[in-house]
Image (spheres, rainbow, N blue to C red):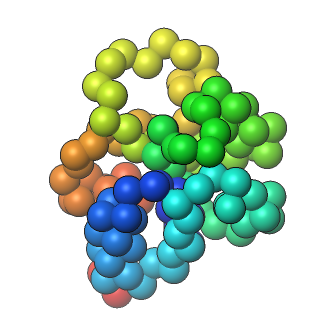
Amino acid sequence: MKVLIIDDDKIVVDLCKTFLNLYAVDTICFERFTDALTILEKGEFDFILLDKTLPDINEYEMLTYLQKLNLSQKIILMTGDAYEYEDELIKNVRTVLLKPFHIEKLKDLLSLKKN
């Protein structure tokens, strides 16, 4: 399994990467959405752990772009905003993971099992 992580919070990235590596999951990490464009266009990953709020792009542009690439169902959208999601773009993502989250929740979402 390969997971793309896009989050500007280094602690979240390091935690996710370290945890996923315990399950032999390959990870590719970026702090900025625009830095991940080439990888996103190739689509060579199983899931995207994506921070909802990034410094280089707004949420609408980001989710619209990913929807055009048919990647919406690979997205686990991470956010600290615990409000009800009414936006159609957000309804298209695989799931929303509220921060702070228990790492076991990520394990369940990705159906991880130790080898």
Question: Looking at the image, is 68 positioned above or below residue 91?
Answer: below
Choose between 46 and 81: the one closer to the eye: 81
Residue that sits furthest to the front in the current view: 55
Residue 66 seen = yes
Question: Looking at the image, is 4 positioned above or below residue 27?
Answer: above
Residue 47 seen = no
Image x and y of residue 34, in percent: 70, 54
* Left or right placement of residue 49 versus residue 11 in this view: right
Q: Residue at x 52, y 60 (%)?
A: 31
Choose between 1 and 56: the one closer to the eye: 56
Q: Residue at x 53, y 69 (%)?
A: 29
Q: Residue at x 64, y 27 (%)?
A: 60
Image x and y of residue 63, in percent: 65, 35
Choose between 68 and 60: the one closer to the eye: 60
Screen quadrant of the C terminus: bottom left
Q: How many marks?
A: 0
Residue that sits furthest to the top in the current view: 86
* Left or right placement of residue 36 versus residue 42 in this view: left
Image x and y of residue 69, in percent: 79, 45
Image x and y of residue 104, in percent: 21, 59
* Left or right placement of residue 35 versus residue 109 in this view: right
Question: Looking at the image, is 61 positioned above or below residue 105?
Answer: above
